[in-house]
Amino acid sequence: MKKILTWGITILLVFMTGCLMVFQALSPTTEPGKPPKRLANVEVETVALREYHETLTLPSKLEADQSAMISPEISGRLETWEVDEGEAVEAGRVVARINTDELEAQLDELKAQLELDRSTVGFAEREFARVQRLAEREISTESEMDAAEEALVNARLSVTRTQRRIDSLTVSLDKAVLRAPFSGRLEKHLVEAGEFVNSGQPLAEMFDLTHLRALVDVPDRYIAFFETENPAVQKYIELAMPGARQDIVAKVEIPGPQKLTGGTYQGITLDAEVVRVAQASDPMSNTFEVELRFANPGNALREGIICRSHVSFLTYPDAIVIPLKSIDVTDVGPRVLVVEHRSGRDYVAVRDIEPVSIEENRILISEGLRKGDRLLVSGGKGVLDGEQVRVVMENGVLQEKAYDPGMKAADWLGSGV
């Protein structure tokens, strides 16, 4: 009985397994339903026209508007300094004096010699007159007349030579007084009082800091744009850069000091004007030196400060400028995505663009977009041409809520719902 029971249970299990297999084979198969497509949440910005300035931003170095080396024109011992180091002086003020004891002694001798020469001229004139009267009465000879005339001429020449030496010494005495060539500030004394100095030797340097000049090295391909009166440049801009006009606007930026926690304090930006454009390039860098001149506020800035110069040379009155982050660089060139509204829904379209110039985090383009286009600026990662998307933010304004009210608006973009 035990064997019969065991075999009976086994046969029953086999039979039931077979039935299940047949039932499963005969029952219709149903595929699981596909989940609904999740739309990418994106941010768009309406393309608008704005003024754009194409600008060169280059490092530059400040120089005083005027600087001069104080040097004597005569040799001698430096008698005194009349101006302290760092002192402000007016134009024409006495800065230093060269000792003139020897020159004054020579001048006294020459003045005495001049009186003697003049008395000699008086004697020679009287002698010449006497001989001339005798010659009229045919008492004196011709040789006596010639001798008297020669003595008078020599006496007068002696007076002239002495007077010239006096004038020369007077000029030298005047040169012994060193004066400020312009209003400014005297730099460090390079020679101490009592030292012997030679003609042309530097004694001190003066700076006029009421205005400063920023020296900028401009690349050769941009230097032609600084010629504002050149019709050839105007024609080139008209043909190569439609919509642009030549417009030179210069500014000098003085960076702020470093912060202890990192970064810098706010600097200052000053308006400047282009006062000189070099006609030849530097042979080493092949750049052209351009000078920008600007007023020094409170004479606070000094020569030698390193700063940044911004020179705008072209202006686009109606330009299309888009965020740099909206551009995707592909193997076929730069592209952007725009969102088109069709049949009540938003779809993505690809546009090829032509970049022209970059300004911080925005870029000027000449082709590919038009005024009023809805440019996709965020959330477009992985989105394909023609794909439907959900616009959750447009021109900085929230359009609809995401499925999770606790999620930040900035986190919606690209998350998909």
Image: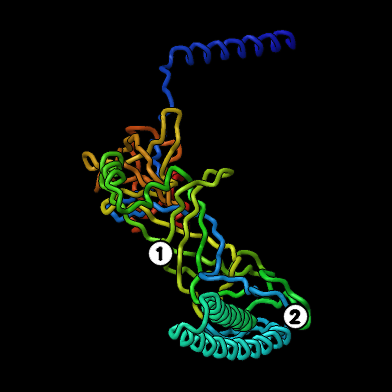
Image spot of residue 68 (x, y percent): 58, 71
Please tell me whether residue 125 is drawn above or below residue 9 in the rendered image.
below
Protein image colouring: rainbow
Please tell me whether residue 381 is drawn above or below residue 22 in the rendered image.
below
Return the residue found at the far left: 343
| Residue closer to the observer: 20 or 83 | 83
Q: Is residue 77 left or right of residue 162?
A: right
| Residue closer to the observer: 78 or 121 | 121
Image spot of residue 131 (x, y percent): 51, 85
| Visible residue check, residue 404 | no
> Which residue is under mark 2?
77
Q: Is residue 240 left or right of residue 267?
A: left
Callout 1 amino acid: Glu
Image spot of residue 125 (x, y percent): 52, 87
Mark 2 nearby-residue class (10 Å; few <14, some 14–19, many ≥20)? some
Quarter occupied by residue 338: top left
Q: Residue at x 35, y 37 (%)?
A: 353
Q: Residue at x 63, y 74 (%)?
A: 70
| Residue closer to the observer: 118 or 97 | 118
Q: Residue at x 27, y 41 (%)?
A: 340
Quarter of the image with the N terminus is top right
Callout 2 amino acid: Arg
Image spot of residue 102 (x, y percent): 73, 84
| Residue closer to the observer: 268 or 145 | 145
Please tell me whether residue 150 is drawn above or below residue 305 in the rendered image.
below
> Which residue is under mark 1?
273
Q: Residue at x 60, y 88 (%)?
A: 120
Q: Callout 2: helix, strand or loop? A: strand
| Visible residue check, residue 2 | yes
Whole-number angstrom distance, CA of label 1 to CA of label 2? 44 Å
